[in-house]
Image (cartoon, rainbow, N blue to C red):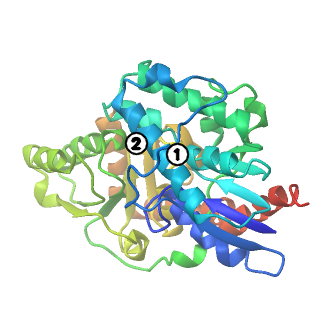
């Protein structure tokens, strides 16, 4: 079977999809499977000129929005690049971004297309203050879900909570299959170590949706309580300067290290102790599974896919979003009790190994793919 994995970002980009899909290739390398990866290079901008039409709504109702215009231009670019570079037929296409899936079905109308929806672009834009809930952009982006449902042969997503979210925007939510992301266990190597001062780490794009302002306020509260710690922030983004200024204002800049973007954080994540990320929304939260596989204690917010990964007090700690005091309380629990911290980390590692392994994902995907074998 000739398979195409259609990504949006190039495989080397950070994130849940790129943490999983490139590693599928070696698992599908057999005489029965032939897999290729495809994505839109960053250098491709404003090349596509073909007019775009959707089957279920008229996008031109929203065309006065610059964000919608950019989305449509990206669609045109992806379409142009696909027609330029893909000439061989495929038996099955698995798309991992709405634009990728819609383009693939347009270019290969007779080829089955499976679409995984990994996250919500509109929720990210709302939480990051770039669009208004219920506004033109929100209406356009949520209309895309029904268009995907209409054109794809099968819909998948990464968590039950995100399937519930999608149910408002599709006609048959019960037809959506949930397959959480999977990770190649060989990439994660827990390392025995003893840090005299507890080391917190977070890995994410520095945007408001990730709740890092709440994390800094919680860290300031810890310092006021006399607790020693170091916070390592790996990632970059538009609010980095704002976060650094907040850390200075709160008097915790000396305890906080901003690394910027790092390509393979899993290589040194095992040297830290506790992973913490108070996201305001997460469809799945891949970095929690990755941190668990590094044998780190997990602290997250009770939202989306995070709450499906963490059972509070069993394999990590959950706190309400937007609550720095509750977050500080959770962080303090694992600072003052290293044995409890290790117990949570060990349980988190066990769950991640059993539920988020790449082997499990490969097994589930093969079963689905074989249903489309001619």
Picture quarter containing residue 66?
top left
| 31 or 186: nearer the viewer | 31
Residue assigned mark 2: 279
Residue 133's place in the image compared with 192, above or below, is: above
Residue assigned mark 1: 306
Taking 204 as reference, is 197 left or right?
left
| 95 or 353: nearer the viewer | 95
User: Which residue lies at the image location 50% right of the left edge and 78% below the top edge?
Assistant: 189
User: Which residue lies at the image location 52% right of the left edge and 53% below the top edge?
Assistant: 80
Question: Whole-percent x and y of residue 73?
Answer: 43, 42
Determine the CA span between mark 2 and mark 1.
9 Å
Quadrant of the image for the C terminus? bottom right
Taking 247 as reference, is 27 left or right?
right
| Residue neighbourhood size for the residue with mark 2, other residues' Cα within 10 Å, grouped as few (<14), some (14–19), many (≥20) | many
Residue 115's place in the image compared with 164, above or below, is: below
- In this rendering, does residue 78 appear at all? yes
Count of numbered circles in the view: 2
| Residue neighbourhood size for the residue with mark 1, other residues' Cα within 10 Å, grouped as few (<14), some (14–19), many (≥20) | many
Q: Secondary structure at mark 2?
A: loop
Picture quarter containing residue 229?
bottom left
Q: Secondary structure at mark 1?
A: helix
| 72 or 28: nearer the viewer | 72
Question: Whole-percent x and y of residue 109?
Answer: 75, 47
Question: Whole-percent x and y of residue 56?
Answer: 66, 25
Residue 228's place in the image compared with 321, above or below, is: below
Residue 157's place in the image compared with 191, above or below, is: above
């Amino acid at each position: 079977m000739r398979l195409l994995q259609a990504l949006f970002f190039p495989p080397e980009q950070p994130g849940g999809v790129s943490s999983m899909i490139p590693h599928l290739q070696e698992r599908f390398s057999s005489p029965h499977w032939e897999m290729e990866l495809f994505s839109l290079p960053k250098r491709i901008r404003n090349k596509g000129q073909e007019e775009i039409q959707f089957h279920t709504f008229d996008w031109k109702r929203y065309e006065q929005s610059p964000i919608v215009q950019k989305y449509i231009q990206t669609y045109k670019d992806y379409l142009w690049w696909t027609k330029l570079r893909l000439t061989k037929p495929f038996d099955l296409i698995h798309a991992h971004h709405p634009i990728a899936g819609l383009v693939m079905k347009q270019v290969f109308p007779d080829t089955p297309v499976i679409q995984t929806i990994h996250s919500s672009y509109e929720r990210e834009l709302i939480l990051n203050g770039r669009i208004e809930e219920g506004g033109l952009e929100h209406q356009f982006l949520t209309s895309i879900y029904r268009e995907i449902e209409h054109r794809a042969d099968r819909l998948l997503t990464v968590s039950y909570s995100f399937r519930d979210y999608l149910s408002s925007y599709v006609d048959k939510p019960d037809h959506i299959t949930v397959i959480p992301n999977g990770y190649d266990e060989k990439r994660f190597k827990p390392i025995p170590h003893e840090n005299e001062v507890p080391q917190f780490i977070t890995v994410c794009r520095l945007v408001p949706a990730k709740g890092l302002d709440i994390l800094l306020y919680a860290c300031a509260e810890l310092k006021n309580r006399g607790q020693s710690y170091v916070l390592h922030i790996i990632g970059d983004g538009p609010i980095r300067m704002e976060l650094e200024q907040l850390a200075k204002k709160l008097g915790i800049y000396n305890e906080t290290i901003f690394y910027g973007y790092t390509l393979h954080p899993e290589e040194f994540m095992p040297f830290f102790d506790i992973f913490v990320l108070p996201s305001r929304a997460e469809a799945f939260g891949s970095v929690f599974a990755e941190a668990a596989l590094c044998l780190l204690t997990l602290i997250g917010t009770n939202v989306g896919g995070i709450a499906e990964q963490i059972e509070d007090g069993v394999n990590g700690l959950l706190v309400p979003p937007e609550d720095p005091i509750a977050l500080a309380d959770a962080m303090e629990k694992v600072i003052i009790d290293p044995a409890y911290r290790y117990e949570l980390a060990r349980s988190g590692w066990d769950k991640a190994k059993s539920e988020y392994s790449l082997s499990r994902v490969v097994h589930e995907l093969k079963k689905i793919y074989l249903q489309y074998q001619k």
